[in-house]
Amino acid sequence: MEGVANVSAGFRLYDPFQKSIIDQQRFQKTNTWSAEAETKTQALALLIAKADATRIVGELAGAGYASKIAPMYVDVNRGFFPKSKTHPAVAEGARYAEVDQWEQAIQTWEAALPTADEKTGGKLLFNIAVGYEVLGSLDLAKEWAGRAYTEYGLKKAKNYVRTLDQEIQNANLINQQMTGN
């Protein structure tokens, strides 16, 4: 046995000062539930209740509009190099980072750059980039990640620069939307 729930919902936001419609959108959602049993009566008993189906489909429609107008927080995981075989400063900075002392981690990694070999230098620059991203300085993060790739050939940094470009573009779009320009 199958049950289908449909909802059509319209959302409209008003600006009371301008006395105008800021945004409006219509959402239609459909969901299907099924249940199997030996008899039709038993299958009906196992099927979702109409009120629950309506509530769920309505929530889906509301979530569709909410994701359009409200910030949606997403967990982002960035890995960094926790150690180096040739330079203890990589691990020391990583320990600062692990306890959320990113400024100290960055200082430790930067101080180690003059004495780092080629492989460790790329790791240090990459870690510094991650540190700046965590601190919210996307442009600095991109600069340091770019250096890790261009100066040391760290391939992981090239992909990270692309990721940061997208993050910068998203941040600019949000700022534009929030200021109305």
Image (tube, rainbow, N blue to C red):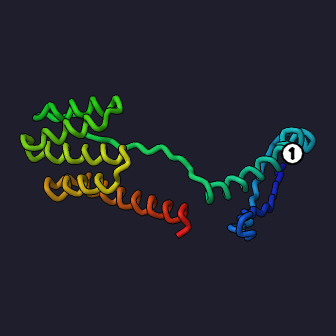
Q: Is residue 4 above or below residue 85?
A: below
Which residue is most to the front? 17
The residue lying at 19 percent from left, 55 percent from top is 147
Residue 160: percent from left, percent from top = 31, 54
> In which quarter of the view is residue 77 placed?
top left
Q: Quadrant of residue 93?
A: top left
Residue 79, x across and y down, in percent: 33, 41
Q: Residue type at mark 1?
A: Ala
Label 1 CA crowd tier, 10 Å (few <14, some 14–19, many 20+) = few
Residue 180 point in image, percent of width and height: 56, 67
Q: Which residue is rendered at x = 79% and y = 61% of the image?
A: 9
Question: Which residue shows up at 31% across the image and 57% down it?
Answer: 139
- Residue positioned most to the right: 41
Q: Which residue is depicted at the point 89% across and 43% down?
A: 44
Between 48 and 130, the one lying in front of the other is: 130
Q: Secondary structure at mark 1?
A: helix
Residue of label 1: 51
The residue lying toward the viewer, choosing from 9 and 48, is 9
Residue 88 is left or right of residue 136, and the answer is left
- Left or right of residue 87: residue 75: right
- The residue nearer to you, when weighing 35 against 20, is 20
Total residue callouts: 1
